Amino acid sequence: MPQSNATVQTLHGSAYISRLCKHWSHRFDVTLTADEGRIDFGDSKHCVLQALPDGISMEIHAPDQESLESLERVVVDHLLRMAKHDKPSDAVWTRR
C-alpha cells in the first residue's frame, strides 16, 4: 500500500489537528487525542496527524498512487483553511 509522509512547520499543531479532526468527524471515523489525530477516509485510505513542538507530522496511506496524491492535496488544502494563527509551511511529501 502506498504511503507518504510530510512535516509542516507551525506553532499551533495540536489546535489545527483538533480542528481538522472535528471537521471530518461528521463524515468519517476519527480518533483524536491531545497530540494525535487519525482520520479513516474509507476504502483503505487514512491519515495520521501528530503534533510536534514546532509543527505537524502527516502520514497518509492509500490503496494506489492516484488516491495517495489526491489525499495529500485534500489534507493540505484543509489544513491551510483551518489555520487561523499562522500559515503552516509548505508540505513536501516523501512517498514510499
Image (cartoon, rainbow, N blue to C red):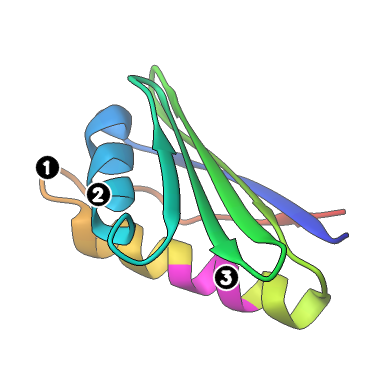
Magenta stretch containing residue 2, yes or no? no
Instruction: Specify which label sits upstream in the sequence, 2 or 3.
Output: 2
Q: Residue at x 81, y 75 (%)?
A: 65
* First to last magenta residue range: 70-74
Instruction: Specify the amino acid type for callout 3.
Output: Leu
Instruction: Where is residue 29? Give x, y as percent.
Output: 45, 52
Instruction: Where is residue 43? Give x, y as percent.
Output: 68, 71
Instruction: Where is residue 60? Give x, y as percent.
Output: 65, 53
Tell which tag, 1 or 2, sits nearer the viewer: 2
Instruction: Specify the amino acid type for callout 1.
Output: His
The residue carrying mark 1 is: 85
Q: Residue at x 33, y 40 (%)?
A: 17
* Vertical position of residue 5 compared to residue 81: above or below: above
Q: Main secondary structure of the magenta part?
A: helix
Instruction: Specify which label sits upstream in the sequence, 1 or 3.
Output: 3
The residue carrying mark 2 is: 22
For the N terminus, which image quadrant?
bottom right
Instruction: Where is residue 52? Give x, y as percent.
Output: 44, 22
